[in-house]
Image (spheres, rainbow, N blue to C red):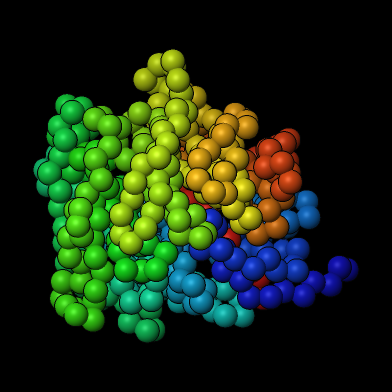
Amino acid sequence: MRMRKLWPLLMAGSFGAMGFQVASADDYQLLVGSYTAGQSQGIYRLNFDSVTGQIDAKPLQVVKSENPSWLTLSKDQRHLFVVNENGPGQTDPVGCVSSYAIDPKTHELSLINQVQSLGNEPTHSSLGVEASHLFVSNYSVSEDPGGTLAVLPVDADGKLKPVVQMSSHPSSRVNPERQMSAHVHSTVSSPDGKYVFSNDLGADKIFAYRFDPKANPELPLIAATPASVQLPPGSGPRHLLFSADGKHAWLTMEMSAQVAVFDYKDGQLKQTQMVELATGQPVSDKAAAALHASRDGKFLYVSNRGTANQLLVFSIDPASGHLKELQRRSVEGDHPREFSLDPSGKFLLIANQKSNQIVVVERDSKTGLLGKTVQKLPMDAPSDLKFMVRQ
């Protein structure tokens, strides 16, 4: 029997934004969020072997939860926050956010509490740098009421308090099918925690806020100056990721299948590059989604869904943050909503939502390139992947 010594480690999705310390272990635990309209029951906790790249098909734990589509781990790995992407016409018509305690030895999840997000189809959440507030993006599929940003205080024990602040934005109305109202897709903090940026697919803008909960606990977000960053009409901003040094940021634009590159300083984003993911390809190939950087900050990975169903690999210029395309690889499935690099950096895991599978592929840490497929694990409608370490 192989003996393994395991060290505590938080592995969240945005490695470039957070940074992490590589453990000397071979085994990790993987949390999978999913949509529950089909066979899935909610959140799955699984073993992952970073030597073989294999996910153990037998779950360590199954947590029943309605549409836990996005998972947010606290920095100390003691709490998990989950958005329940519910809305009208679903089993649970009310958007919610759930908080779970994580046992420090077993990583067993236990529910602390659940509160309403005061919006429909919450699709993303993130913790502020000090973990005192959770920022929830209510996407809202329907035009009425439209998407909103909700701010929820978090107790030291991980308990969520009710929403204290809501923010909504005017839509661009460029695309009559998808942009007649706001659709807040994600919200993230700046590396220093002083600013919060909300990406609104329906508005074609990034909205900027100063975050000062000590000055005003009831309304911790105040519009920054400038209050927004304008993006190309009909582009549909989705997810924003800061570089580890906080000097640059990258943004996927879902509807135009582009990645915008920014310089960042003191609450201001200045666009310096625009990268095309599907040049000359039909609209059906344009559905940019997730993006994550390697832990060394040398490579950026981006998923493009639609009929393209690809992962794109870029090298990152350390001085400018600019991207250079290195590889396009099929995800060998349909609709790669999210993906994650494993803690060892040797594998990349893809959540193919519509083909009901998690695909594990090899990764060369020196070149950044993706290699052969080592596993295709059946999983109903996976939507998010987050790593922990087993103890």
Residue under the point 45% across and 51% down = 248
Residue under the image location 37 percent in, 20 percent down: 283
Above or below: residue 367 compared with residue 100: above
Percent across and percent down for residue 44 are 53, 58
Q: In this view, does 103 lie to the left or right of 253?
A: right
The spot of residue 301 in percent (x, y) is 55, 42
Residue 170 appears in the picture as rendered: yes
Task: Judge left or right: residue 371 versus residue 116.
Answer: right
| The quadrant where residue 212 appears | bottom left
Residue at 36% across / 69% down in the picture? 193
Residue 120 location (% of width, % of height): 21, 51
State which quarter of the image contains the C terminus. Answer: bottom right
For image coordinates 61% across by 80% down, the residue present is 105
Seen in the picture, residue 363 relative to 56 is either above or below; the reply is above
Q: Which residue is situated farthest in the bottom direction here?
A: 156
Residue 87 in sight from this viewpoint = no
Question: Is residue 321 shown above or below 333?
Answer: below
